[in-house]
Amino acid sequence: MALVLGVEMSALSTKVELRDADDGRLLVAGQAAHEGARPGRADFDPRLWWQAVVDARKDAGGALGVNAIAVAAQSDAVVLLDTDGRLLRPALVGGDSSMQIDADWLVRDLGGRSSWVAACAAIPDPTHAVVKLAHLRYHEPELFERLGKILLPHDYLTHRMVRRYVTDRGDASTTGYWSPRENRWRPDVLRVIDDVVDWGRCLPDVLGPTEPAGDREGVLVAPGTGSQQAAALGIGMRAGDVVLALDRSGICFAARERLTEDPTGRVADRADAAGRFLPTTRTLRARDVMETMAAQLGLDMGYVDQLALSAPPGAGGVRCFPYRELDDATGRPPHMGTLAGLGPGVMQEHVARALVEGIVCGLLEGLDALDAAGVPTSGRLWVVGSASRSAAFQRVVADLAQRPVSVPRQADAVCLGAAMQAAAVLHGVSPDEMADAWGMGSVREIEPDTRLDAAALRAEYANARLG
């Protein structure tokens, strides 16, 4: 029996899953926390990511007998090495509003939003590697004199295994200096940051979906990818499907066979790990906003799910408008959150339901943006991440979207997707063929409550966001 190991590296921990390469059956799993890691913008020693992989395998009993391995990791960090392959500084992880200044001048100096859409199919924001590089160029200029390689987290971990500088098209498309239309790096974009650095030699080679990165002591190493792209693999996503993903940040994305190139910049065109594209919209820090507002309202997050399910659709007229720290895609300023509709008879469950509905309305604006950009969205509507573990989110998404919601068989689809990529490379087949072999189509569906006037409720939230 051939075995594959999927590795998922998130902001706070690393998880591994050992699976049967033929049918995807889970054999053992392990996890290790990233010592000292915290949400939000931070500097972090990437060597601790590698140690977390080692520790997670130990937690899985060693995960022995592996034939192939793939790494999926967060894309909002950058690792810089010198020309000898040594770390120049800790990895810069995440982003915050202070880095929006760097994003703004990048947009201006390349010629405006339309120039960025044409070059890289996305408007830069603090999560993009290109903005982090711009920030470091002006705050740590001496570092650029010794710059050798620029890697994302999954690139770094793959490099530790095979000693090659490689990435995949999915993660490359999250950087802000790779063109989905031309399928190549855009070093000319990076010259806006610094016109002396030889950017071409700093960038890793981009591998195809089933092209091996190399091997480590006889174990085949797949190209790996970003967390979003691995999640798409892990649910067996096909063209026309849409995903609402809720973790620390919330994103909405679809799978498509061709480019979108939204001229408004609201929809970023990312590549997937199977040869397609993932037109994507993003809501910053959705989970963080929900947890903060729940605490301010005196709601225990452990009971929000239960409370929200006990309230009627529409929350009895209560409306919870989440605060907005920053919305890069539209340029809207920060906005205070509000709670409205309080009166006699309002209970905690109404407030909990209103909080979930407010967050979901924001995510569904992403679905509206995909539709407005002409992206086909008539396939399945998936919820993944922490939302796929929340019965309240599943219910509210179905009710407010007024369409069935598909819940994957495994809540954490990222690690599963990494393992599936490893199996596809091992067997020399496409990711779609591997998804069929692993039975990725099995899901649970939530039907909407058609008695709710979802359009009116969403209009209330949309009008408030315009304020």
Image (tube, rainbow, N blue to C red):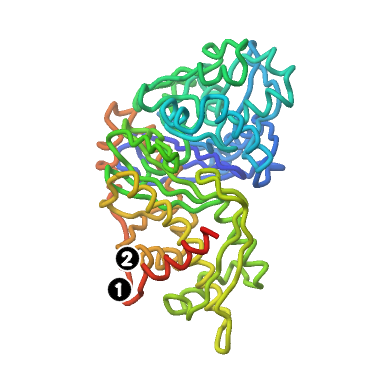
Above or below residue 285? Residue 118 is above
Whole-percent x and y of residue 383? 40, 55
Task: State the residue lying farthest toward the bottom.
Answer: 344
Q: Give me the C-alpha separation between circle 1 and circle 2.
A: 7 Å
Is disc 2 placed on a helix, strand or loop? loop
Is disc 1 placed on a helix, strand or loop? loop
Above or below residue 329? Residue 219 is above
Marks 1 and 2, the one that precedes in the sequence: 2
Of the 4 image quadrants, the one containing the N terminus is: top left
Q: Is residue 3 visible?
A: yes
Q: Residue at x 45, y 64 (%)?
A: 393
Identify residue for label 2: 402
Whole-percent x and y of residue 150? 58, 21
Q: Is residue 333 found left or right of 143 in the rendered image?
A: left
Q: Residue at x 70, y 35 (%)?
A: 43
* Dot 1 amino acid type: Thr
Whole-percent x and y of residue 236? 31, 44
Q: Is residue 221 visible?
A: no
Proximity of marks 1 and 2: CB atoms separated by less than 8 Å: yes
Of the 4 image quadrants, the one containing the C terminus is: bottom right
Identify residue for label 1: 450
Camera-side residue: 8 or 264?
A: 264
Q: Is residue 444 found left or right of 142 in the rendered image?
A: left
Q: Residues within 10 Å of mark 1 (few under 14, many from 20)?
A: few
Q: How many marks?
A: 2
